[in-house]
Image (tube, rainbow, N blue to C red):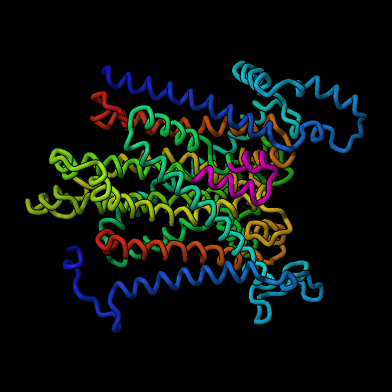
Amino acid sequence: MAEAKFQKVETGGMNRRRKVLLIIAAGVLALAVISIWGACMDPAKYAPNYEARRLMPSLSHLFGTDHQGRDMFFRTICGLSTSIQIGLLSAVISSLVALFLGSLSAVFGGRVDTAVGFMVDLCMGVPHLILLMLISIAMGGGAAGVITGVAVTHWPNLTRVIRAEVLQVRSAQYVQIARKLGMSKWHIAAKHIVPHVFPQYLVGLILLFPHAILHEAAITFLGYGLPLDTPAVGVILAESMKHLATGMWWLAFFPGIALLLVTQLFDIVGDYLKILIDPHSARQ
Amino acid sequence: MNKGLLRYFGKTVARMLLLLVAVSMISFFLVNNAPMNAVDAFLGEAKVTDEQRALIEERWGLNKPPLERYLIWGNNVLHGDMGESLYYHQPVSKVLKEKFLSSIVLMGTAWILSGLIGFVLGVLSGVYRGTWIDRIIKTFSLVLASTPVFWIGLLMLVVFAVELQWFPLGLAAPIGKSVNDVTLSERIHHLVLPALTLSITGIANIILHTRQKLIDVMESDYVLFAKARGENLKQLVTRHGLRNIALPAITLQFAYFSELFGGSVLAENVFSYPGLGSSAVLAGLHADAPLLLGIALFSALFVFVGNLTANIIYGIIDPQIREGGGING
């Protein structure tokens, strides 16, 4: 039905759907390549090499080298891989919590709604970074602390969104009419509520990835997250801060750009997924 | 003020006090379960025997059960005594006050800047949806939304402090000057980069939100009808658009207090700005439990003030709540 509204777009022999699918596949592939490449990388590639210290970016060292002569390009890829894995894990956990609590709250209402609302407020009541610090300290730092912290702090927003969406659909006229017509709860949920809420959930989940990854980098940057000897982007940027005044700008610039690109890749995948699921909402 | 409104406010305040208690409990137990040792942090390099250590623990009440310790701490906090910071060797309340005064300048500037710029850009983007203006603003904010605060800070440092040398590398005032001698212009000079960094991160959120809301409104049936009645774009935006999106935008900006605080922790650390954020990090790294707890509690209070304000604005403006419905009902 909705497709009928579109004009036919000429995209070089491909229809719109196929093009969108291709972009999503490319984005996912790129992310997968980075994470696998980084995870399987030989640590010797970014080991200290005191003969090549403080080198500007060049063809042999794409992102330059640091004060110990470590190759920043390989170190960054490795760090990105760590970030993606941690971000993926904690964002998925978070979004599932949000989906569960959000629908629970909207469907049952009353006390359940109040309880979920209280938990959301509690979690939103403390700045995420402070809560992340507290959780990381309580768990003794390291990857476990970061994953727990990010998973525990990132569900409230999406929970609110899902709750609001479900409530809105439930009170919409067509749902009320469906109810008055005697449709079963399951029928209404499957026909009206899920198709409306699912895109929101998916978009919310994808929007969680950058947040999760950035918070991981931030908490590591502050010295609470991953240990200093892991090649994480947060560690790299924290180290770079000591060398900025001496003009080694590439230590901060390239790893940051790379992190930005990865989060952008997640965004692109999310956006095109949105077009695929709900063509109307993504129409420019 | 009518009855419904009063009841709504009463309920909101009670709810928030309850939350504050819950937050204090959670942070207390998180900090207490941490493997960091306050006695070690206090002693530093000094060597003591096990008996002396036990004596210190007894004197600090570290051998009591956690719940009792929480109640003692909570009781003291209610009486205005938050303990002594192990790192600064000063009462926590004094450190908090000092650091907050310096942080609020930074956060306030960034908050106002990001709110104003974000709203204007969001409206522009929503009104001119699909044009190049929209595309530029949208891309800009999407990129910003996934840019780490501290990285922006680092770039600002590289460009404006190291290369161009327009602004100092950090701190709130020139080194070696006593607090009373620092002039206003020196303060502002030191504030520009951190405030800019902090505000940039808040902009994306409000732009995207405002844009989306405006688009929703402009696609609604009542705007279609208004168009059919012959209203022009300006009338459509001011009569139907702004009225509907201003409230969510303001609420969003108050709800953003939490992110603002988090962002200021990062910004302050990059610029060595001596505010609450940098002390929070120092407190954690030096196992300064009293200060860390104080900051956590204070940050919660800060966020609550933001949320409370948002709720009060909602209560005053939204007729549904004014009639006693409540936003959670």
Which residue is located at x 68 percent, y 36 percent? Answer: B179
The quadrant of the picture occupied by the C terminus of chain B is top left
The quadrant of the picture occupied by the N terminus of chain B is top left
Q: Give whichever of B199, B75 is nearer the camera.
A: B75
Q: Give whichever of B57, B321 is nearer the camera.
A: B57
Task: State the image coordinates of residue B260 (x, y, percent, origin top left).
Answer: 50, 43
Q: Give whichever of B46, A53 is nearer the camera.
A: B46
Which residue is located at x 29 percent, y 22 percent? Answer: B5
Asked whether residue A141 is in view, the answer is yes
Count how many numbered circles sit on residues in the image. Answer: 0
Quarter occupied by residue B67: top right
Quarter occupied by residue A4: bottom left
Task: State the image coordinates of residue B54 (x, y, percent, origin top left).
Answer: 85, 24
Task: State the image coordinates of residue B134 (x, y, percent, origin top left).
Answer: 32, 62
Task: State the image coordinates of residue A13 (x, y, percent, origin top left).
Answer: 29, 83
Bounds of the magenta segment = A132-154
Which residue is located at x 73 percent, y 20 percent? Answer: B64
- In the rendered image, the vertical position of residue B267 relative to residue B23, given as above or below: below
- In the rendered image, the vertical position of residue A92 relative to residue A59, given as above or below: above
Quarter occupied by residue A213: bottom right
Tell me: B296 left or right of A166: right
Predominant secondary structure, magenta span: helix
Tell me: A17 left or right of B306: left
- In the rendered image, the vertical position of residue B132 relative to residue B190, given as above or below: below
Residue at the extreme left of the image, as rendered: B229
Asked whether residue B185 is in view, the answer is no
Check if residue A12 falls in the magenta segment: no
